[in-house]
Amino acid sequence: MSLGSGQATDVEGIGFMHDKTSWRWLGTATVISIGIAVGGYLLGNGLLRAKEAERAVTVRGLAERDVTADLATWTISYSTTSFDLSEAQAKVRADTETIEGFFKELGFPADALQPTGANVTSFIDNGVNRYTVRQRLALRTTDVERAQRAVSRQFDLVNRGVLLDEGSAMAYSFTRLNTIKPEMVAEATKDARASAQQFANDSGAGVGGIRDATQGYFTIEARDGDSGGWGVSDTPFKKVRVVTTVNFSLN
């Protein structure tokens, strides 16, 4: 049985449509395959980057520096007690003049010594009022060496009749911290990298860049330990210290 011309055309059309559909499926499959391959690569590469990101070490770096104080502050507290308020006030005024003369002899300018407080208290002693008058003066100077000489001669004041209270003490301060901060932070970071390098050597890796870091706090303490306590004077010799925390990547 032979096919007519119309039937032959239909068969050819069906074949063409089948070929077209096949090409579409082939194209779609190719795109999907490429997508899976690219996605797999990106996923694998992402996991690799995540793995590398885990290779890090957090260490601390220390920097210390000995410095000399550039500011001296001496609080001088003195008092007197009397049954007569006027007499007590007169004695404190005389002591004040003696102290001012003492510092003038040592070469301090008049404005280096300033009053910082005064008060009067009273109590009953055998039925009679007794008055205590207290006065405080403060020496503030950047001439640290001169201040040291002054405090070493404080018993000259006692010999002149001025009775210093227990609250009298010299304090030395270092005020130029900002001038040494950058160098000390660099030293602490260098120390941290040395510690990180030791970890890296132990794990067969290399030290990369800094991922993040925390500077930490600067502290200024007595160079020779705590100088607190009565009868122990502060000294101008200080130790500045900073600890940084640095997170390094490992290669």
Image (cartoon, rainbow, N blue to C red):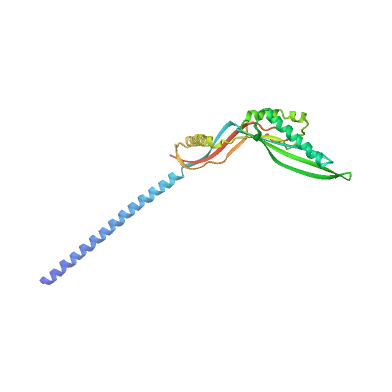
Q: Residue at x 71, y 42 (%)?
A: 117
Q: Is residue 96 left or right of residue 2?
A: right
Q: Position of residue 166 (x, y in %)?
A: 75, 36
**Quadrant of the rendered image containing residue 3:** bottom left
Instruction: Indicate whether 28 appears above or below 81.
Output: below
Work out whether residue 38 or residue 120 is closer to the camera in this orientation and state it. 120
Work out whether residue 80 or residue 208 is closer to the camera in this orientation and state it. 80
Work out whether residue 10 or residue 206 is closer to the camera in this orientation and state it. 206
Q: Position of residue 83 (x, y in %)?
A: 84, 41
Q: Is residue 109 left or right of residue 231?
A: left
Q: Is residue 251 left or right of residue 230?
A: left
Count of numbered tags: 0
Name the quarter where the C terminus is drawn.
top left
> Residue furthest toward the right?
126
Q: Is residue 170 left or right of residue 184?
A: right
Instruction: Indicate whether 148 appears above or below 51.
Output: above
Q: Position of residue 124 (x, y in %)?
A: 85, 45
Instruction: Indicate whether 34 appears above or below 237.
Output: below
Q: Residue at x 36, y 50 (%)?
A: 42
Name the quarter where the N terminus is drawn.
bottom left
Visible in this render: residue 124?
yes
Q: Position of residue 37 (x, y in %)?
A: 33, 52
Visible in this render: residue 2?
no
**Quadrant of the rendered image containing residue 107:** top right
**Quadrant of the rendered image containing residue 219:** top right
Q: Residue at x 28, y 58 (%)?
A: 29
